[in-house]
Image (tube, coloured by chain):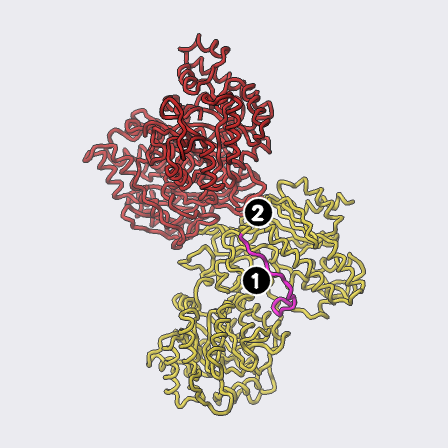
Chain colours: A yellow, B red
Amino acid sequence: MVNETQHTCSASSSSKSDGGSSSGSESSKDSSRCSTPVLDADRHERLREKMRRRQDSGDKWFSLEFFPPRTANAAVNLISRFDRMGAGGPLFIDVTWHPAGDPGSDKETSSMIIANTAVNYCGLETILHMTCCNQTRDDITRHLQKAKRLGLKNIMALRGDPVGEEWEEEVDGFNYAADLVKHIRNEFDDYFDICVAGYPTGHPEAESYEEDLKYLKEKVFAGADFIITQLFFRSETFFKFMKDCQAIGITCPIIPGIFPIQGYHSLRQLVKLSKLEVPQEIKDVIEPIKDNDAAIRNYGVELAVSMCRELLDSGMVHGLHFYTLNREVATTEVLKRLGIWKEDPRRPLPWAVSAHPKRRVEDVRPIFWASRPKSYIYRTQEWDDFPNGRWGNSSSPAFGELKDYYLFYLKSKSPREELLKMWGEELTCEESVFEVFTSYITGEPNKNGYKVTCMPWNDDPLATETNLLKEQLEKVNRRGILTINSQPNINGKPSTDPIVGWGPSGGYVFQKAYLEFFTSSEIVTALLKVLKKYESRVNYHIVNVKGQNITNAPDLQPNAVTWGIFPGREIIQPTVVDPVSFLSWKDEAFALWIEQWAKLYEEESPSRMIIQYIHDNYYLVNLVDNDFPLENCLWQVVDDTFELLN
Amino acid sequence: MVNETQHTCSASSSSKSDGGSSSGSESSKDSSRCSTPVLDADRHERLREKMRRRQDSGDKWFSLEFFPPRTANAAVNLISRFDRMGAGGPLFIDVTWHPAGDPGSDKETSSMIIANTAVNYCGLETILHMTCCNQTRDDITRHLQKAKRLGLKNIMALRGDPVGEEWEEEVDGFNYAADLVKHIRNEFDDYFDICVAGYPTGHPEAESYEEDLKYLKEKVFAGADFIITQLFFRSETFFKFMKDCQAIGITCPIIPGIFPIQGYHSLRQLVKLSKLEVPQEIKDVIEPIKDNDAAIRNYGVELAVSMCRELLDSGMVHGLHFYTLNREVATTEVLKRLGIWKEDPRRPLPWAVSAHPKRRVEDVRPIFWASRPKSYIYRTQEWDDFPNGRWGNSSSPAFGELKDYYLFYLKSKSPREELLKMWGEELTCEESVFEVFTSYITGEPNKNGYKVTCMPWNDDPLATETNLLKEQLEKVNRRGILTINSQPNINGKPSTDPIVGWGPSGGYVFQKAYLEFFTSSEIVTALLKVLKKYESRVNYHIVNVKGQNITNAPDLQPNAVTWGIFPGREIIQPTVVDPVSFLSWKDEAFALWIEQWAKLYEEESPSRMIIQYIHDNYYLVNLVDNDFPLENCLWQVVDDTFELLN
């Protein structure tokens, strides 16, 4: 909130590029009661339950407010920011409603689509703001239906700003947030968790502070679950407000809204819009340094940290809501200094989970999309049931086609010029492609001095786990085994292992060695001869772009390649090599050569023709070494293949 | 078949007491195509498909015919015989239809109930014979419906014998087996596999051999899937018959019926009933030794082996059907000498599977019923879905109550007098009960010189696997930790391990250490103190007969305690410790003290009161050591408990 018009602030500032991996980021705390074997309670609880559980356990939390971006490029950046800030463990994020920006539409910059992306693709518990004035009942119902369909579970119900200067009641319309709360409860029963806004110094348009408290009580009694407050500058303001609320019978959680001052101009604009008074002692500090952004931000962080400490120490506050203005540095700094930024390296599952309620039991995925979880979510968004416990097979519905490579949440974070520097302004032969793969693996700069930090199949630098295989991967990529996915075999490491661990503590995790790569038909011919020797040990799938498919796997049977054994639980096997999905992945993996790489070059250019040649002629191969307790034999398989070729 | 009246032969003879464990006995051969991760194709194929697969692979097979017993005691013996002979790997067994014995009823000696027991409780593919003459269409339909409901999938369609001396056609009735075949196909479509009888020397009542072949063709063309022949004495008889069948267009499998001569009188009676001619050369051998049963049986075995060899060597015969006369020795001997008795120590799953089609995907069970699989099947017979992949929880339907302890297939194989010798004619104190448990574990005779080969909770001698724990088990039972179920921890042994292995080859099996026992409240109090030290490692459930339940397990979450990792497959986890089912098992486990043990003694007798005391006051405890890669800590837990008590 703050105010629905605050997104006049720039969205492109201060994108700290820490390149962290996009883990689902939901807390992996165990539940004492869970109706399925899925590991994290967070996937089963509603927001208000999570809030209550955190309050009961004394575990302080925070949440983050964002506004929708104005351009598609800014949307790509915002999603990266969601991933990075999601890693700190917010209880939820919220996305403001921008009436002027077609907020319920399918535009990539709409409130609805940004919130949808946060829930589904970033796995974040999300509140969508919604205002009701100047909108028809039908419009509002349609927005709410759409939000529900997209998997959004929480609404911040707001009145919104008047169109003209003065406020006029509409007959039979929604004039107050309370009307919207009632409407949501009437039409959607208990489906949504509802949040409303509280004004610690009274709403600027209210007749009086007391009058405004009455409105707040009305909103809560209409069915709201909790309150987030407008920003304020002194903790006493909040304490008084909270006591006054309690005095008139408001018992739901009240979450203080925190605004770390990040710059002179943004503060001024905000104050003007929200009609708040900045205390003199703050003005006194800021005015003399108004042209020194860094100094103001440092001061803002200090101020926020000390006020947050007062709030948390009071025992009355369990969570803090941050108005981020879509910026990262100041809020992250405050959270880290407060000690509530919890970058938990532990993962509930080896892949990033989605927060859509339909997917709450999902705990098995094909390994192929390990580096492209958002694309996997996109291609399975129409599924009604998600695999749980076992992948199974014939029952799996089909994958959606991936045509929209340029959907902002599937797009590469790097612009074309950067990609060209990494992948080569000009390719001269297949070997120059091998070099790009090799540079990505080694992390060494390419011959033009640029580091290759992403590939069409991996938008992030090499995973820590893959680093374990770095030496061998480098060797084989140099020779034209172009690896795009791999994992080492693991025979029972503790689930708390910082590199390969996942799930609750006290368990053991296992993996079968996996290697997936593109390679030439010449190498495939030799490989197939070598694989005869490994027939009972190695499962393989070899397919080209036309779908010619060679495999020794029992037809349609998935092979579990990652699993975990935990105290007091059933076995979890989160990744499988599934022969059926591999054919869907194949389409995507081959298409990425063209869509992400070839199209960087002019049509008919030699560079483009080289990529096209690889696309048309290479095979996509995956290998699983079933003997996980023994030394990984896949490198031997590759060595034998090269030996046979020589 | 042979003839529907053959069950005049005694059913109580020659029960070779080899005490083998009752493993499900279905072949564990892998399928090259399987629609679920369940391990054995046999559970998914219809009988005719299994037959075809065996024929294609050149894998010779056999089947066994039995008739329903005349008494309930004989039924208990027959079921043990099913278990023992099932271990040799028959492709199917068949149960004859005895019109005089109320064959479709719920009596424990009815054809229907014996076949039901074979399918559901012994896990054997079973054909139920059914005759049609002198029965109404409605009766027959009702029988077929009941058979289907019970999970029977195969019918041998027969005419049956006339009531009087002469055969009279009934108008609108079923006069021929072909009528029955048509009726089954009309009413049940393709649900049943149908078998019909072939007479290599022509049916005794047929006008001619040629005329009889025409009837056979009619039966086959009415919808039969294969033919089993009447017995014959010379392989040429069968070869001629087979060629004649083929000549008139019969192409379905024809399975020769083999009758190993087992005694002079049974042969005479059989010949009389089936109106067959015994060849002179056989008579010449038998007559002189007609009073020497052993000599005749040896001769019968020789004769059968040599004829079977001729049949198999011809390449025309892929399977042999044995008329066992409900006896074990001769048939088993013939099969072993032919090399087609395949006592495969390998198990598709750690527990004996049921052959009911409803249960074909079942691959998870609570560990509690490990020694009482028939009781488990009985108590879950009303379930519509069976756990597959995961046990889950809230979705599991309730267990049926076990009231019918005396159902013949749940009953102890040992009579009361034997049980008293094993468990004590007279008990003087709780310690005399400890001694019974200890004797069962050690295999040493009790103080009266009798070996304790079964217990109320285990109808068979100690499992080989449990032998691994023998020394520790002996120690703790002596001190009043009365163990009824246990398994060692296993950290990745090959799936072909002769003791703990199961499932297809090339895999690895794992177990968490498990211990389940009755013990006094005094020991429980100390145990609970000790368990605090092991809180994060050991899961426990402790319950008394009243249902007072103490546990540290996450509520309702099952704990997988046996699992296997196989090449190219998803994880299989066939046994779990499930908190909810434990409460159902508790009822059964406590009731067995009274039903099987206390009731051996007079009411008010001291022996009975001791058992009653234990039943009323002891606790049932189960412990799981979650740290399967480390040394089993459960013995240390017990040691610590005793130390605390001293």
The stretch drawn in magenta includes residue A534: no
Q: Residue at image x 42%, y 71%?
A: A188
Along the viewing direction, whichever of B4 and B309 lies nearer the viewer: B4
Mark 2 crowdedness (10 Å alpha carbons): few <14, some 14-19, many ≥20: many
Q: Quadrant of residue B67?
A: top left
Residue numbers of the magenta segment: A395-411
- Earlier-in-chain disc, 2 versus 1: 1
**Mark 1 belongs to chain:** A
The secondary element bearing badge 1 is classed as helix
Q: Is residue B442 at all visible to an observer of this figure?
A: yes
Screen quadrant of the C terminus of chain B: top left
The stretch drawn in magenta includes residue A398: yes
Residue hosting label 1: A377
Q: Position of residue A232 (x, y in %)?
A: 46, 83
Q: Position of residue B350 (x, y in %)?
A: 46, 39
Residue hosting label 2: A557
Q: Position of residue A508 (x, y in %)?
A: 51, 51
**Mark 2 belongs to chain:** A
> In the rendered structure, which amino acid carries the disc numbered 2?
Gln
